[in-house]
Amino acid sequence: MVTRQPGDRTLPTLITLLVIGVLLMTFDIRSEGGGVTGVLRSGTQTIVAPLQKGAAFVVNPVVDAVDTLTNLASLREEVRALEAELAEKEAELVAVQDDLAILEFYEQLYELEATGSDLGRTPAQVIGQPEAFDGALIIDKGSSSGIVVGQPVIDTSGYVVGSVQQVTSGTATIVPITVGPSGVAVTVGNQIGTVLPQVTTNVMRLTLDNAQEPVLRGDRVVTSSGSVRFPAGYPVGQIVADVAPTADALTAEVEPFVQPEALRVVVVLAWPPDPITAITPETTTTTSSTSTTIPGEGSSTTTSPEDDG
Amino acid sequence: MRLRSVLTVGASLLAAVVLQTTLFSQTEPFIPDVVMLVVILLCLTRIRPELLLGIGFLSGLAVDLLGSAVLGLQAIVFTIVAYLAIRTKDRADVGRIVTGLWAGMMTLAGVVLLIVVGTLFGQSVLLGEGVVDRLFLVPLTNFILALIVAPTFVRVVDRDSTAFRYA
């Protein structure tokens, strides 16, 4: 099947390039994406970013138009479903406003000062994905908009998407939690655990190490105040099926609220606002996005991002 | 390789990278790997084989630099695909469909290699939802694209209007 002429140098060239490739991989893994490889990535992305933005400017309206035409039949049903959902959410909003009023009353009563409500939020448009198998997302905002590596990313509903992996002045690369290499510290009810991505599926795996109670289908999984990557209280997903603990451990599947490949707009959070206080949770006092711990009293409250109003 | 050919190849690869990261990231489920396809089709031209391997390596490296997976992964995959394509290109110049099938087979080899090497190096970002479907849909889409553009592409790069006329 394979033809090879005498005297050709393709095989030695191939071997040389493969060795260089393996060395690059080893170097990149060992330097954890920083150093020279980080500079190279940044440089390349900076060069290509204007072209990507230009192409996205032309392509996105065309893709949207084609999408609309192909989905025309189902649009009416979708509008009805969205109207019903809107009515439901408006009712929930009224209830949340009541809760907020009560929260505000207690904050005044105990003289608590909210420090988490002023988290910087940078909305950004998703302009593409690096390649067919790469689950990362490229957005049209970068360091010139205040985005830095490691910042958490949510969608417009406040659901966790992932975190920033690479930044150039005009773009950033987001790695979703469903494909990223790291887990996320979460809480289910009052139990603390970790969700990890799984291969070939968006469904994630929840592990609770000191599980005392079962988790039930539909239970919300939210980011924990123990997380160093995400502010607390942001919804990650919901439990797929009822699971009871075995001894102290519990493993369950979590359906994430976000389908990263369907996202068009995301929001990058400027978090932690102060990295020094972020690593000393006992002294932090926040309301909207992290837990509030009152030293000496041992009480704490946690509110979800929806409570922001 | 003349300056004009260098510019044509460079422009093709740049266009492929930009289209891959923007337009073709939104054509679910039929997402091609356009950069890999350009590398495969370049192997049908008269460019020297050693140079083709270098082009494959640099193209893969460019994709690596724009992506979130480990640096060097796509460079290795594209280089091996280019090598396979160089070794088997004699079988592609038979007819339009055969050329398309050949490009599809090369792509299949490339994506399988990408998943295998990516898994060995713990690149979970490549193994998200629908990876098994994409394993077949990416080569299929590349097959269709090669069917349409392969002869014209070779003629433009080689500046030879008689190339790939399938006489």
Image (spheres, coloured by chain):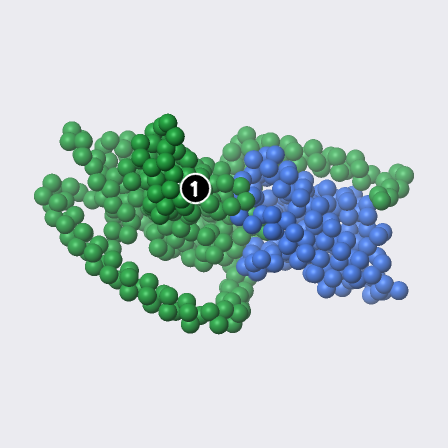
Chain colours: A green, B blue
Would you say A154 lies left or right of A45 here? left
The correct choice, above or below, for A84 with respect to A97 in the image is: below
The correct choice, above or below, for B147 with respect to B105 in the image is: below
* Camera-side residue of B85 and A98: A98
Secondary structure under tag 1 reads: strand
The correct choice, above or below, for A32 with respect to A203 in the image is: above
Would you say A264 lies left or right of A157 here? right
| Residue in the picture at 51% in, 59% down | A53
Most extreme residue toward the top, as rendered?
A: A247
Q: Quadrant of the N terminus of chain A?
A: top right
Instruction: Give the image quarter of residue B120.
Output: top right
- Residue A82 location (% of width, % of height): 36, 65
The answer to whether residue B166 shows anywhere in this view is: yes
* Dot 1 alpha-carbon crowd within 10 angstroms: few under 14, some 14 to 19, many 20 or more: many
- Residue A127 location (% of width, % of height): 50, 57
- Residue A99 location (% of width, % of height): 18, 51
The answer to whether residue A274 shows anywhere in this view is: no
Check disc 1 and report the residue beneath it: A253
Q: Quadrant of the C terminus of chain A?
A: bottom left
- Residue A9 location (% of width, % of height): 82, 38
| Residue in the picture at 51% in, 33% down | A32
| Residue in the picture at 16% in, 29% down | A296
Q: Chain of mark 1?
A: A
| Residue in the picture at 75% in, 38% down | A14
* Camera-side residue of B30 and A22: B30
Query: Number of marks in the image?
Result: 1
Q: Amino acid at mark 1?
A: Glu
Instruction: Give the image quarter of residue B54.
Output: top right
